[in-house]
């Protein structure tokens, strides 16, 4: 057990700062599908509240609703509200998201917003246009 | 964070508990020693029924409906009903109550052939094509070399969970949830198993469910083998390949079990390495290759004839290259087998993100009632 714990500590200490791409494809595969797309939740199997977050198709179908910001800058997206903003951080309801994953989601949302406004340096999703 | 304490009822939150891998080596050498399925879980064999009667405080006839519903020799019936209630912190604090499992099993055996069906409840699909809360999670045809025995060659075709790893019953454990055998990820495929008291090997090929939207829509295959070096020591290894519409996953696992007869303690370890290859696209030209570590270690002690205590630790790092993405959990489960059919269970977990540096901690303490038909 001690060896196992030591291995965990050693590997955690080896980590680098987050340089993962804030793209729809990566976010879906690495964060949304494994964290939100579980059997009882936003999998295609259940499609809770109409959101399917375990496939690119499912995320893109609700991309506007999930990630858009209001004109006054206040976040209104269901994803941001439920995961990051509201005081009772409810989702995922079976286990918390890591802070670095939340930060990458915010980066993705900001990138999509830049893409919508035509100021993006790089595309985060091919389907989003100005 | 403003913590809240509320009472909620989560309808059909779901959950399927399988077999007790704690009994392998400590009570029998193989899963098929107590179950009709070569991978364990579900219907019990005669030996499994005897074990259910022995490991309980009050005993009672262990057969389907206490043996009061006679069935012909070729037909086996059973079922499991489970519900849970308790405290969940994710990090919002809630009191929750939810049904977990309502499933019925039927198996008809004709010589070397058998037809198996598991039917029951499932969460209905919101705004989809499957609005009913009923389904059949498993259904398959099986041929086995030695009719009525727990060893030999087994071939199955139909819908079931690919055979991989230690197959812990608790689906929130990392090696289940993130280990290729997540809850309800059963799908259509073919499985070939060879089981011997000294070793067993399983090969599974599976496809995306062509009929309904499934959990983890994937094509792939899995190989898993266990060797029992003695009656108290087992080591295993396996590999799994999964391909979805947007990524590929290659995972390898190593498992071990050691039974200590003196203190009646079973130690179980599973450690997985998974390489996920996110497809390269025009807007994701770099693709992505998060490499994961997934592990669980569980020590199980039979406190007496009817109380079983599991204490375990788990580790999951969803990308070993990135700092603060690791999480660790301490799991404690206390099983109280009141009768051959009734089990009371306490599941408790504390989960830390990067040892407290990666986010809010999670926890739960759930009381569970399980009735086996």
Image: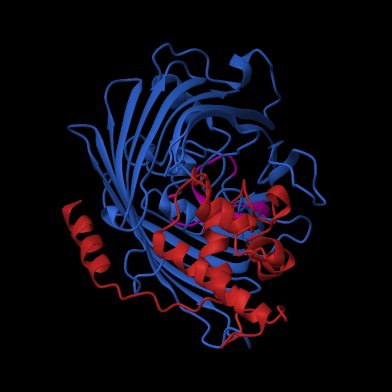
Quarter of the image for the N terminus of chain B: give it: top left
Q: Is residue B21 left or right of residue B95?
A: left
Residue at horizontal 48 percent and vertical 36 percent from the top: B34
Span of residues in magenta? B147-166
- Residue B162 in the magenta stretch? The answer is yes
> How far across and down, in percent of the image, does residue A18 sit?
38, 74
> How far across and down, in percent of the image, does residue A100 sit?
40, 65
Q: Which of the chains is blue?
A: B
Q: On screen, B354 above or below B3?
A: below
Residue at horizontal 72 percent and vertical 59 percent from the top: B209
Q: Which of the chains is red?
A: A
> How far across and down, in percent of the image, does residue A105 sit?
52, 66
Q: Quadrant of residue B207?
A: bottom right
In depth, the one of B226 and A95 nearer the eye is A95
Residue B215 visible in the current orientation: no
Q: Is residue B25 left or right of residue B116?
A: left
Residue at horizontal 80 percent and vertical 43 percent from the top: B131
Q: Is residue B170 left or right of residue B216?
A: left
In depth, the one of B244 and B96 nearer the eye is B96
Q: On screen, B326 above or below B66?
A: below
- Residue A77 in the magenta stretch? The answer is no
Extreme-right residue of the structure: B129
In depth, the one of B328 and B75 nearer the eye is B328
Q: Quadrant of residue B22?
A: top left
Q: On screen, B148 above or below B85?
A: below
In depth, the one of B344 and B111 nearer the eye is B344
């Amino acid at each position: 057990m001690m060896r196992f714990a030591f291995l965990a500590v050693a590997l955690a200490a080896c980590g680098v700062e987050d340089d993962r791409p804030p793209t729809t494809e990566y976010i879906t595969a690495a964060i949304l599908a494994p964290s939100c797309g579980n059997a009882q939740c936003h999998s295609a199997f259940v499609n809770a509240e109409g959101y399917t977050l375990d496939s690119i198709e499912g995320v893109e179908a609700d991309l506007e609703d999930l990630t858009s910001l209001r004109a006054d800058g206040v976040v209104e997206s269901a994803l941001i509200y439920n995961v990051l903003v509201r005081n009772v951080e409810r989702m995922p309801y079976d286990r918390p998201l890591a802070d670095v994953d939340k930060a990458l989601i915010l980066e993705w949302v900001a990138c999509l917003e830049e893409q919508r406004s035509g100021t993006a340096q790089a595309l985060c999703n091919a389907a989003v246009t100005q | 964070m403003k913590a809240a304490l509320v009472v909620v009822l989560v309808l059909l939150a779901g959950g399927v508990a399988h077999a007790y891998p704690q009994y392998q080596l400590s009570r029998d050498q193989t899963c098929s020693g107590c179950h009709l399925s070569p991978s364990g879980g579900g219907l019990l064999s005669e030996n499994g029924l005897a074990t259910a009667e022995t490991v309980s405080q009050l005993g009672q006839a262990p057969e389907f409906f206490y043996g009061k519903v006679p069935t012909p020799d070729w037909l086996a019936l059973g079922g499991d009903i489970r519900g849970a209630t308790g405290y969940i912190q994710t990090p919002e604090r809630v009191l929750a109550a939810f049904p977990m499992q309502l499933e019925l099993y039927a198996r008809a055996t004709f010589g070397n052939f058998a037809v198996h069906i598991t039917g029951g409840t499932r969460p209905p699909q919101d705004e989809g094509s499957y609005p009913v809360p009923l389904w059949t999670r498993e259904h398959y045809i099986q041929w086995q070399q030695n009719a009525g025995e727990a060893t030999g060659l087994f071939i199955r075709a139909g819908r079931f969970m690919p055979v991989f790893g230690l197959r812990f019953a608790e689906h929130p454990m990392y090696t289940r949830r993130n280990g290729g055998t997540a809850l309800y990820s059963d799908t259509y495929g073919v499985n070939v198993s060879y089981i011997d008291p000294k070793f067993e090997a399983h090969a599974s090929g599976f496809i995306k469910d062509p009929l309904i939207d499934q959990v983890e829509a994937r094509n792939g295959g899995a190989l898993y083998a266990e060797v029992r070096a003695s009656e108290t020591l087992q080591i295993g290894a396996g590999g799994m390949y999964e391909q979805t519409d947007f990524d590929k996953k290659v995972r390898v696992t190593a498992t071990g079990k050691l039974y200590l007869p003196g203190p009646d303690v079973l130690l179980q370890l599973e450690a997985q390495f998974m390489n996920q290859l996110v497809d390269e696209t025009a807007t994701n030209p770099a693709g992505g290759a998060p490499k994961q570590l997934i592990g669980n270690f569980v020590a199980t002690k039979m406190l007496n004839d009817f109380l079983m205590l599991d204490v375990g630790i788990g580790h999951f790092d969803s990308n070993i290259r990135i700092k603060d993405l690791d999480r660790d959990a301490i799991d404690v489960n206390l099983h109280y087998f009141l009768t051959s059919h009734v089990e009371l269970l306490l599941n408790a977990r504390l989960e830390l993100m990067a040892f407290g540096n990666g986010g809010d901690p999670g926890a739960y303490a759930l009381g569970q009632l399980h009735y086996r038909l």
